[in-house]
Amino acid sequence: MMPDKEAHFEIIDKNYKALMHLSSPDPSEHIEWSVIIIYYMALHYIQAYFDATCEEHYSNHMSLQNRMREVPQLRSIYGRYRQLEDDSRKARYDGETFNIYTLRNETLKSFQKIQDLVLSWLENTDRNSYNLYKLFPPN
């Protein structure tokens, strides 16, 4: 059985806790894993959107991307989502390294936009959004 919207939010919460652990005490020590986790948090926000609005769940990345390009609300964040996914793949498979500057100015900016828009579309006033900038202060 595929997760519903609330199950996706629970996964996001667990990922946030892992991110808190990785970013303390030195946020630059495990940046690549942070990039990966941030991507998965964004993925679950997108999945929660689909589960809540059309009860659709996509089991592979290509189907999800295709559907994102078809949905007017998601088109505006598609590029940001793809950047997070690409960076996650680079960190996982290519061993690419990232720094705090890139994380704050690209990764977190994209994540915050996705999170804020999805939560506003779902009208989740009871759901706290995560300010990931607090976990990764500037040098």
Image: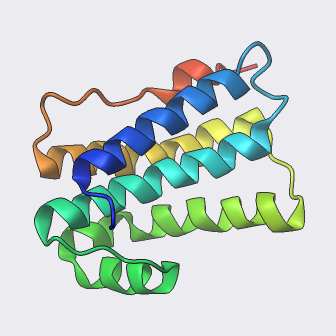
Q: Is residue 102 visible?
A: no
Compared to 32, does 66 lie above or below? Answer: below
- The residue under the point 79% across, 60% down is 92
- The residue under the point 44% across, 26% down is 131
Front-most of residues 83 and 24? 24
Compared to 59, does 28 lie above or below? Answer: above
Q: How is the image coloured?
A: rainbow
Q: Is residue 98 shown left or right of residue 43? A: right
Total residue callouts: 0
**Residue 108: quarter of image:** top right
Q: Is residue 118 shown left or right of residue 14? A: left
Taking the view exactly as shown, the residue that stands out farthest to the top is 25
Q: Is residue 59 shown left or right of residue 86? A: left
- The residue under the point 56% across, 54% down is 39
Q: Is residue 105 shown left or right of residue 87? A: left
User: The N terminus appears in which quarter of the rendering?
Assistant: bottom left
**Residue 26: quarter of image:** top right
User: The C terminus appears in which quarter of the rendering?
Assistant: top right
- The residue under the point 60% across, 41% down is 105
Q: Position of residue 116 (x, y in %)?
A: 29, 42
Q: Position of residue 52 (x, y in %)?
A: 15, 59
Front-most of residues 49 and 81? 49
Q: Position of residue 121 (x, y in %)?
A: 15, 52
